[in-house]
Structures are given as structure tokens and as C-alpha cells.
Amino acid sequence: MGSIKVKAIVIGSSDYKEKDKRVTLFSLEKGKIYGVLRSVKSPKAKLKFAKELFCFGDFFIETPSNVITGVDVQNNFFELSQDIDKYYIACAILEVVNTVAGEGVENTPLFLETLKALGTIAYGNVNDKYVLIKYLLSIFSAMGYRLAMDACSVCGEKFSGKRYLNLDFGEIVCLGCKAANCIEVSSRVGTALKLLNTTDYKKLSTLKLAKGSEDEVLNILNINFDRRFNKKLKLL
Ligand SMILES: [Zn+2]
């Protein structure tokens, strides 16, 4: 019997056996892994805090039982649980990472991006939906589905007229390259995507998009996410 130590964040939690909890962790070292918290339903349980979403720190896990024996908490993102809007957006981030992270597969960029997004929602004075959009754009890009807003992904021509999202390929194309299964990207969605693509998380607080355009953008990105990863995100 051995043990491992991973830096991880709790992204899911469910009941397991009578008194235990099974948590899904997204770790720096091993991507998505599972851990068992023994008898944590009792209010006196030593590790009961570790069954909460967003609990982030060093986890000590016994192998091969997967029992978590200790956690050094670095941050529990307490602020996220104090504001229902922040909480829902942050849960959508966890849903995304739970969908795209590979089990046992290290993915440092995704790990860092996830922490950055959650930190911005928790502590930044920003429109939380902008953070989710930015996060989704970076996920698409990292997975090879960059939503380029400057030029058509098929013919390479700079956009002058209407733009379309090709749902089969997850790319933005021009009218000439429009095929079946394309949805139009309105000009305000196009502008919003362009701005969010190029604005760093730290600068998101200075960004102001046309009112309501963030919902329109999220709607399109959610359709795209569903087509790419076969999962519809729960958004308010
Ligand atoms: Zn084209």
C-alpha cells in the first residue's frame, strides 16, 4: 500500500456507501482522479471540509484504496458560496473541466486556467459571465477549435460580411464557405468574442460589452460545447 500527494481542487462530490463521500478531484499532477472520504457525513469528521466543491490544496491519497487521508487546504474559495450568481458561474466552470479533463491525464494549462477563472470570479470585480465566456474560448482553443474572429478558417479571407459558426467543425467561416449546419454569428456576438478573446482575465473588469450580448454569446458557445463534447452546460 502506498500513497500519493496531489495539488487538486474538488470538482464533484457524491454519496458513497453509507457514510462516505466520493469526490472528483482535478489535480495538477494526474488530471481527473477520484478520492474517497471516509465517514465525512458526521459534523465532527476531521476532513468534512474536503467534500465541498472548490476545496483546493494538497491531497494525500492512499493507493490503491483511493482513501483521502489528509488535506492541506490552500483556498476554499469561500466567496463563491456567498453569492448565488458567482456560485452558478463557478459551477459551470467545474462542469466544463469535469467534461474535458482526462482521467489520470496531466493537463497543466487547463489546471492553471481553471484556477485563474475561479479566482477572477471570486475576487475580481467583473461580470462573471465574461469570465465563463473567456474560459470557454480558451478551452475550445486548447482543444483545437479556436474561434478566430478575424479571418475565415476555411478560405483565410479577412471577414467583411456575415460570419457563421460551423457546428460540424467548431470554426468560424465566411458566407462563401458556409455549409450545412452553420449558425449565423451576429455582429454584436462577433464583437464580444473578439474583445473577450484578446482581453486578459485581469483586465476583464474594464470591459463593457453591449447589454445582453454576453447571454447571446454564452448561448452560442453552449451549443458549440454540446457539439464538441456532447454535454450541455447548465446555465441560468
Ligand atoms: Zn471563407
Image (cartoon, rainbow, N blue to C red):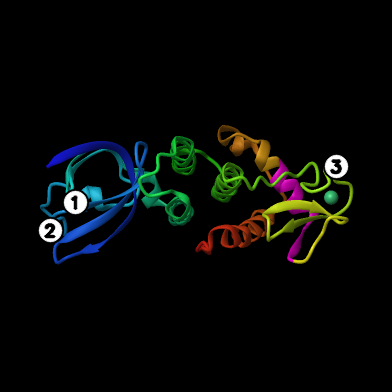
Residue 168 image-quadrant placement: bottom right
**Label located before the other in sequence (2 or 1):** 2
Query: Percent x, y for residue 155?
Result: 83, 46
Front one among 8 and 227? 227
Asked if disc 2 and disc 1 are in contact, CB closer than 8 Å, the reply is yes
Q: Is residue 185 magenta?
A: yes
**Residue 125 in sight in this render:** yes
Residue 70 image-quadrant placement: top left
**Residue 74 in sight in this render:** no
What is the distance, in whole Å, between disc 2 and disc 1 at their CAs?
8 Å
- Per the image, label 2 sits on a secondary structure element best described as loop
Number of the label disc, if any, that sits on residue 158? 3
* Residue beneath the point at 42% across and 53% down: 98
* Residue beneath the point at 73% across and 58% down: 166
- Per the image, label 1 sits on a secondary structure element best described as helix
- Per the image, label 3 sits on a secondary structure element best described as loop
**Pointer 1 residue:** 48
**Pointer 2 residue:** 42
Question: Hey, what amino acid is under mark 2?
Answer: Ser
Side of 160 where 94 appears, left or right: left
* Residue beneath the point at 51% across and 61% down: 233
Side of 156 where 136 appears, left or right: left
Question: Hey, what amino acid is under mark 3?
Answer: Lys
Q: Which residues are magenta?
A: 181-194
Query: Percent x, y for residue 146?
Result: 66, 45
